[in-house]
Amino acid sequence: MLASLGARLLSFLHRMGCAFVFFLNSLRALLSVFGHFSLLIKQLYAVGVLTLLIILVSGLFVGMVLGFQGYNTLVDFGAESSLGLMVALSLTRELGPVLAALLFAGRAGSALTAEIGLMKATEQLAAMEMMAVDPFEQVIAPRLLAGIIAMPLLAALFTVMGVYGGYLVGVLQLGVDSGVFLSSMQHGVDFYDDIVTGVIKSGVFGVTITWIAVYEGYDAVPTSEGVAKATTRTVVSASLAILGLDYLLTAMMFGGA
Amino acid sequence: MAETVSGDSENFVDLRDLSFCYGSRVIFDHFSLQVPRGKVTVIMGPSGCGKSTLLGFIGGRQRPQSGKVIVNGRQVNGLAKRDLYELRKSMGMMFQNSALLTDLDVFDNVAFPLRTHTDLPATLIRKLVLMKLQQVGLRGARHLLPAELSGGMTRRVALARAVVLDPLMVMYDEPFTGLDPVSMGVIVKLIRELNDSLCMTSVVVTHDVPEGLSIADRVYLLGAGNVVASGDPDYMRTFDHPVVRQFIDGLPDGPVAYHYPAEDYRQELLGRAQP
C-alpha cells in the first residue's frame, strides 16, 4: 500500500518534471514563431476564432442569469439600482476569467491535445524531426502562443457579453433604469482592482491551459485509446488547475483587502 | 563540435557493435552492419526483430545503449541537436504509414522541406515540386489532401517528399506493407529508379521477401539480436540456413517459433484451472 502510494507520487513528480522541461523547451521555441508568423495566425484562428461562438453565447446567458438572480436578491433590500455594479464585478473579477477558461479548456484545449496526439500517432511529428524540422518550433510554440494571446481576449469578450446580457434582463425586462445600471458600473468598477486583475487571471489561465493541452498531446500514448485518455486528462487537469489557481490568485489579489 | 569518425568511404552507414534492450528484452547484442554507398540495402527479418529501431538509430531518433552509429563519416549517437538536424538534411525517410502532414495538400507536403530549409523563390519551388511529383506520377493530384488519396498514392507522395531535397540517403520503413499488387509494383520500381537516377543510398526495411529481393543490391536478414545472414539476393535465395530458408520460403514454423512462449498446451487445457 505504502509502496504503491510512493510509486504513484514518484510517477507524478516525474511527470511534473517532464512537463516543466517541456515548458522550457516550448519557451525557447517561442522566439522562432516570429519567423513563421503565418503559423501563429492559423493557430489564433483555430484556438481563438473557433472558440468565439461558445464564449459569446455562454457569456450572454450567464449575464442574463446574473441579471435575474441579482435583481431578485437586490430588490428585497431596495438596492436594485446596484444591479449593474453587481453584474459587472461578478464578471470582471471571477465569472469572466473562470468560465471563459473552463470553456476554453473544453473547446480549444481538448482540440489541441487531440490534434497533437494524432500527429504523434500518425508519425507526423517523427516525420518533421526526420526532415530536420523541430516540432517544438513548428507545432508546439505557435499553439502555445496562440492560446496565451487568445485566452484574455476571449475572457474579455465573455465579460462584455455578460454585462450586455445583464443589461438586457435588468433594463429591458425588469425595468431597472438604464442610466442607473450603467453609472453604477462606471463608478463602482475600478480599472486596476477589477479589470486588470481579471486580465491577469485570464492570462495565467491561458498559459496553464495551453501548456497542459500541448504537453498532454505531445506526451500521449500514440494509439487511439492513448489520445482519448490524453484529451480527457487535458480537460480534467486544466479545469482543476483553473479552479485551484483562481483561489490562489484571488487570495493574493483580494485576500488582504 | 560534431565528431567526425574516420570511416570506410565505401559505406554510407556503419553500425558498429551496437547493443540495445527494451527493458529486459535484448533487441541487439553487439550488432554490426554496413550500408554500401550508392546501393540499395534491404534489411529483412521477422516482426519485432528491431528493423525499424535500426532506422531510428541511423536517423538519430533513438540511441543504442552502446556502440557507434556512423553515417557519412559522422557519429550520429554523439551529435548535438543542431548538428543532428544538419545531418538529417542529407537524409530522406519514408514512414510505414507515410506520415503526410494532414492539413497540407499534396503539393504543400512535398514543398514543405524546400520551404523550410531553402530560400528558393516560389516559382523555383513550384517547378522542383512538380518535377518530383511527375517522377512519382502524381503531378495531377497535387491539389488533393492526404485524406483523399489511396494507400499507394500516399506512399508515392511520401516518396516524393523524401527525395525533394535530393538527399544522399533515403530510408524506407516497410514501404510495401498493405499495398495492392499494382501499387506495390510501382513503389518497387520507384525505389530502384530513384536510387539509380539520383545516385543515392537506399536502406529498405521490409518483410516482403520477393519485393525486397527484387530491388536489393545487398540483403541483411536479422534475428535473435544479430545478423543471421547477409549477401546479394541470389546468394540469399539459395543459402541453406534454417532461419534463412524459413524466412525466404515463408514457412510457418521453424527456428523462428510460430507460438509465443507459453506453458504446455495440454496441461493448460486439461490441468489445473488457471486464468
Image: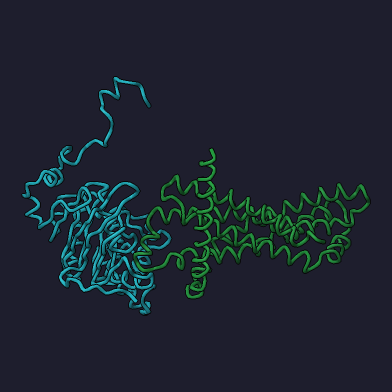
Chain colours: A green, B cyan
Q: Residue A231's x, y, as percent? A: 52, 50
Q: Residue A70's x, y, as percent? A: 83, 50
Q: Residue B129's x, y, as percent? A: 31, 70
At x 16%, y 40%, the residue is B255
- Tell me if residue A191 comes above or below residue B177 in the rendering: below
Image side of residue B163 versus residue B112, left or right: left
Image side of residue A200 versus residue B275, left or right: right
Which quadrant of the structure image shows residue B59?
A: bottom left
Q: Residue A171's x, y, as percent? A: 84, 56
Image side of residue B144 versus residue B166, left or right: right
The residue at the far front in this view is A2
- Tell me if residue B267 comes above or below residue B150 in the rendering: above
Q: Quadrant of the C terminus of chain A?
A: bottom right
At x 15%, y 70%, the residue is B10
Camera sees residue B138: no
Q: Nearer the viewer, residue A69 or B60?
A: B60
Which quadrant of the structure image shows residue A210?
A: bottom right
Q: Nearer the viewer, residue A203 or A153?
A: A203
Camera sees residue B87: yes
Which quadrant of the structure image shows residue A56?
A: bottom right
